Image: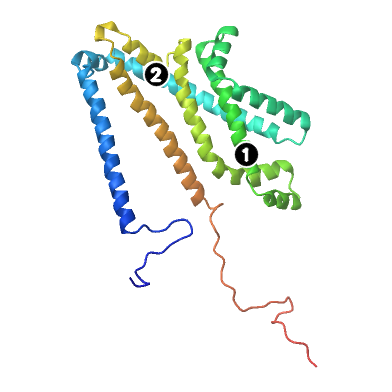
Amino acid sequence: MTAATAPEATALYDVPGPRTRRRHLLYGVLSTVLIAALVGWVVYLLFDTDQFTRTKWTPFAYKGIQELLLRGLGNTLKAFAISAVLALALGALLATGRLSEHRPVRWAATLVVEFFRAMPVLVMIFFVFVALKVQPLPALVAGLTLYNGSVLAEVFRSGINSVERGQREAAYALGMRKTQVMSYVLVPQAVRAMLPAIISQLVVALKDTSLGYLITYEEFLHAGKLIASNLDYDLPFIPVVMVISPIYIGMCMLLSWFAHRVSKRQQRSPKTEAVDVAPAEPGTLLPGGGPPRAPGP
């Protein structure tokens, strides 16, 4: 094999040889067979337990059932939208407190973050709903906001601290105030590092809206529970799961797709793109007019 056709090796990855490629192909075939067998076994069990009978799937053809599911989906999205906005705001506020130079403010913010981050979401939702006698939607939003806001506060703090210290020192050397340093230097650079973690936490908030059915909030899972517990349709629990689960998965994938688009747009932003610099050309180098000359004798 000549040098021109030899596979290039890098410090992070070596191009596999023929034996390695055959081994990888064998692994891929075996994995595909096992996954296909598992899917086939699950489908066989579904047919064997009569999960695809007409009686179990009939309710989804009724307009009333469809309106119930759409109303539950709308309530889920409403609770998620409100809690996501409030959690982001609370996270930014608590992160600012944790980054404060004043020790009492920093300690207070740390105490709030650690307390609500360690508290189970369901306990907070039940406490607000039962002890404070709040309506289901505000109770659900309050629990999701306190928990996810505390987690996002740590995401924001770690993202800002991940920016090189020299960036902050250079901004202060230019005479910028702390608010300006945070707004124009640290946060724009930290957003790229924080965005995947932020979207992951918002996905958690979206899934946790399903806890609302425990406090009788009429969200998507609550609507599915009403359909699945109907004796007239032979308790269609599995069909309800097969209808609701893809919708939840689709909403989470939509959030991830949106984050990917935002990240790509930031990379194409004029503020973050490299600026082409014109090549150096001969010209006047001194204010006097001509190029510098060697001193005469």
Vertical relation: 226 (above or below) 80:
above
Q: Is residue 217 visible?
A: no
Residue 146 spot, x, y in % from top left = 59, 22
Instruction: Quadrant for residue 142, please give it.
Output: top right
Q: Which residue is mark 2?
A: 220
User: Where is residue 181 drawn, in percent x and y?
Assistant: 69, 45
On-image quarter of the N terminus: bottom left
Sequence-first disc among 1 and 2: 1
Q: Is residue 143 above or below residue 25?
A: above
Does residue 65 appear anywhere in the picture?
Answer: yes
- Callout 2: SS: helix
Q: Are marks 1 and 2 in contact (CB under 8 Å)?
A: no
Disc 1 is placed on an element classified as: helix
Identify which residue is drawn at 47% across, 30% down: 203
Q: Nearer the viewer, mark 1 or mark 2?
A: 1
Q: Which residue type carries mark 2?
A: Phe
Q: Which amino acid is tagged 1?
A: Ser
Q: Looking at the image, which residue is at 28% across and 47% down?
A: 26
- Distance Cα–Cα, label 1 vs label 2: 34 Å
- Quadrant of the rendering where the C terminus is positioned: bottom right
Residue 158's disc number: 1
